[in-house]
Image: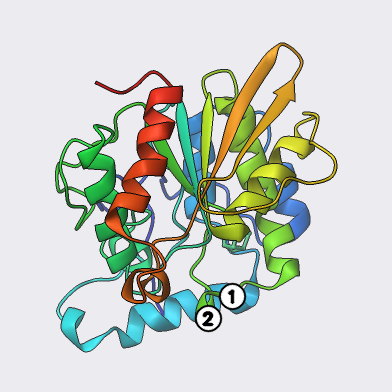
C-alpha cells in the first residue's frame, strides 16, 4: 500500500518529512491545537489515526481506477483548501476515493467537484469553472472548502468513531477561521451536522432544537458578538445530480445566496 511521501514535490503538499504524524485519536487531539493554518494543513495531510481509512485510502491509491492507471495517487488525507481568511466555508463529507484521494485537493478530480466548482465559478467564487488537479490554476475567492472526515472512506461512509477521531482537525481549523467566516455552506445532512457540532465544540451557542437540514435551509449561529449564516445545500453527489434531486439552478441559488450574504457577489 502506498501514498505520496511528504515533501517530495507534490503541488500544494503542505507537509515535510518532519511533520508530526498522529497515529491515534489522542494524538489527533494533541497535535491539532495551537497551530497556524499551514501547519494544521500539514499535520492533517499526514494523519494515520484511523486504521481502516488509512488501509482503504492507500489500497485505492495502489489499485487505482483503470482510467487513472498512469497517475500517481495522493493516498493521504485531504486538508482544507482555499482562502486562508475565508468569508465562506463549504463543509463536505469526505474525499472521494478517485477524486481528492487521487489529486490531493478536496473536491478535485471527481464529478461532485465538477458540479461544485462550475457553480462556484458561475456565482463568482472560483477563478475557473473546472478543478482537475492540484496545479490547475484554480483559485477560490473568499472561500475555503473542508471535508468533515479527511480520508476517503469505503462507500463514502465513515464510522462514528472515525468521524469523532477526525473532529479535532475541523474544530481546530474552524477556530483559526472563525473571525473571518460569515457564511457556512453545508453540503448534505452530514456537512450540516458537522458544522453545528464544530461550532458547538468551539463554544458557540447552537440553536435548540437543532435546525433541520434541507436544500436552502438557513440557520443563524451566534458566538459572542459574532454571527454566522448556516446554509443547507444538497450534496452534488451523482446520486443527487443524476436523479435531478439537485439541479444546476438549485446549486447556483444556494451559492449565490452565500456570496450575497458574505458580500462577495458582483
Ligand atoms: S479520517 Fe481524519 S483522523 Fe482519521 S486518519 Fe484520516 S485525517 Fe486522520
**198 or 217: nearer the viewer:** 217
Above or below residue 164? Residue 34 is: above
Residue 19 in sight in this render: no
In the rendered image, residue 248, in percent from the top left (x then y), is placed at 28, 55
- 115 left or right, relative to 164: left
| Neighbour tally class for label 2: few under 14, some 14-19, many 20 plus, Cα within 10 Å | some
CA–CA distance in space, label 2 to label 1: 6 Å
Image quarter of residue 158: bottom right
Image quarter of residue 68: bottom left
- 5 left or right, relative to 57: left
In the rendered image, residue 128, in percent from the top left (x then y), is placed at 15, 42
In the rendered image, residue 197, in percent from the top left (x then y), is placed at 74, 46
Above or below residue 248? Residue 264 is: above
Residue occupying the point 61% across, 59% down:
189
| Neighbour tally class for label 1: few under 14, some 14-19, many 20 plus, Cα within 10 Å | few
Residue linked to disc 2 = 154
Determine the quadrant in which ligand 1 lies.
bottom right
**166 or 142: nearer the viewer:** 142
Residue linked to disc 1 = 157
In the rendered image, residue 36, in percent from the top left (x then y), is placed at 54, 27
**The N terminus sits in image quarter:** bottom left
Above or below residue 142? Residue 230 is: below
* SS category of the residue bearing label 2: helix
Give the farthest residue toward the top. Answer: 225
- 205 left or right, relative to 236: right
Residue occupying the point 50% across, 31% down:
37
Q: Does the residue labelled 2 lie within 8 Å of ligand 1?
A: no
Mark drawn on residue 200? none
Residue occupying the point 63% across, 53% down:
213
Above or below residue 146? Residue 86 is: above
* SS category of the residue bearing label 1: loop
Amino acid at each position: 500500500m502506498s501514498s505520496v511521501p511528504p515533501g517530495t514535490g507534490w503541488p500544494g503538499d503542505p507537509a515535510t518529512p518532519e511533520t508530526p504524524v498522529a497515529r491515534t485519536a489522542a494524538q489527533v487531539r494533541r497535535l491539532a491545537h495551537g497551530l497556524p493554518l499551514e501547519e494544521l494543513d500539514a499535520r492533517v495531510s499526514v494523519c494515520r489515526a484511523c486504521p481502516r481509512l488509512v488501509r482503504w485510502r492507500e489500497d485505492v491509491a495502489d489499485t487505482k481506477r483503470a482510467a487513472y492507471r498512469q497517475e500517481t495517487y495522493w493516498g493521504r488525507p485531504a486538508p482544507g483548501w482555499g482562502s486562508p481568511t475565508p468569508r465562506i466555508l463549504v463543509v463536505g463529507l469526505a474525499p472521494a476515493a478517485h477524486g481528492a484521494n487521487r489529486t490531493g485537493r478536496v473536491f478535485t478530480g471527481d464529478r461532485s467537484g465538477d458540479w461544485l466548482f462550475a457553480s462556484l465559478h458561475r456565482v463568482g467564487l472560483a477563478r475557473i469553472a473546472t478543478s482537475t488537479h492540484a496545479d490547475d490554476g484554480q483559485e477560490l475567492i473568499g472561500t475555503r472548502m473542508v471535508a468533515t472526515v479527511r480520508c476517503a472512506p469505503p462507500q463514502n461512509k465513515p464510522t462514528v468513531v472515525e468521524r469523532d477521531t477526525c473532529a479535532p482537525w475541523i474544530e481546530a481549523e474552524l477556530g483559526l477561521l472563525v473571525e473571518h467566516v460569515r457564511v457556512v455552506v453545508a453540503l448534505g445532512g452530514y456537512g450540516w451536522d458537522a458544522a453545528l457540532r464544530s461550532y458547538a465544540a468551539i463554544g458557540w451557542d447552537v440553536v435548540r432544537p437543532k435546525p433541520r437540514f434541507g436544500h436552502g435551509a438557513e440557520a443563524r449561529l451566534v458566538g459572542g458578538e459574532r454571527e454566522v449564516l448556516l446554509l443547507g445545500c444538497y450534496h452534488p453527489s451523482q446520486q443527487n445530480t443524476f436523479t435531478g434531486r439537485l439541479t444546476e439552478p438549485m446549486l447556483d441559488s444556494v451559492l449565490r445566496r452565500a456570496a450575497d450574504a458574505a458580500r462577495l457577489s458582483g
